[in-house]
Amino acid sequence: MTPMSDNTPAIEIRDVVKRYAGSKKAPPKLALEGLSFDVPQGEVFGLLGPNGAGKSTLINIMAGLVNKTSGTIRIWGHDIDRDHRNAKLNIGIVPQEIVFDPFFTPFEVLENQAGLYGVAKALRRSEELLRAVRLEDKRNAYA
């Protein structure tokens, strides 16, 4: 994370709307409607709500996996639209489902993720990360 020196919130969400287009079988769906809130620096924050409330949609928007219809989101002051690279460098997601590809080794998974985040090959730390979690001996193993 890149904490700001002032009182800038860790996360700023302003008037975020997400509308999914309809189809022949389903009408348009409003997933988020004018959502606004801040998460202050140093706070522990829980995003709670019933199924269909838009929690996953919001998280996926913040991570750059889903495009919002309108509004602004800043992560540590970085706008996810205008400064998406720095915004993405300051957020991570741990999915609730087990998500792995049995065709990739742990080393390949780390390399692919680094590539998705635009980390140059010379700056990647895949070997170091495998050592940190004591998986260096599984570097080339398949799941």
Image (tube, grey):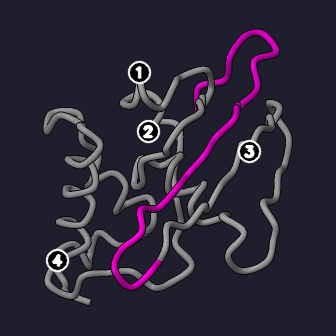
Camera-nearest label, 1 or 2? 1
Mark 3 lies on a secondary structure that is strand
N-terminal label among 3 and 4: 3
Residue 82 - label: 1
Residue at the image point whose x is 20% and y is 58% from the top? 112
Q: Which residue is mark 3?
A: 35
* Mark 2 or mark 3: whose residue is earlier in sequence: 3
Q: Residues within 10 Å of mark 1 (few under 14, many from 20)?
A: few
Q: Is residue 129 above or below residue 25?
A: above
What residue range appears in magenta?
A: 1-26
Badge 4 is on which residue? Answer: 104
Q: Is residue 95 magenta?
A: no
Question: Disc 2 vs disc 3: Cβ atoms closer than 8 Å?
Answer: no
- Disc 1 residue type? Arg
Kind of residue at badge 4: Phe
Q: Residue 142: horizontal and vertical position, in percent?
A: 19, 87
Instruction: Choose the circle earlier in sequence order: 1 or 3.
Output: 3
Label 1: element kind: loop
Helix, strand or loop: magenta stretch: loop
Query: Toward the viewer: 51 or 135?
Result: 51
Q: Secondary structure at mark 2?
A: helix
Distance (Cα) linking label 1 and label 3: 20 Å
Q: Nearer the viewer, mark 2 or mark 3?
A: 3
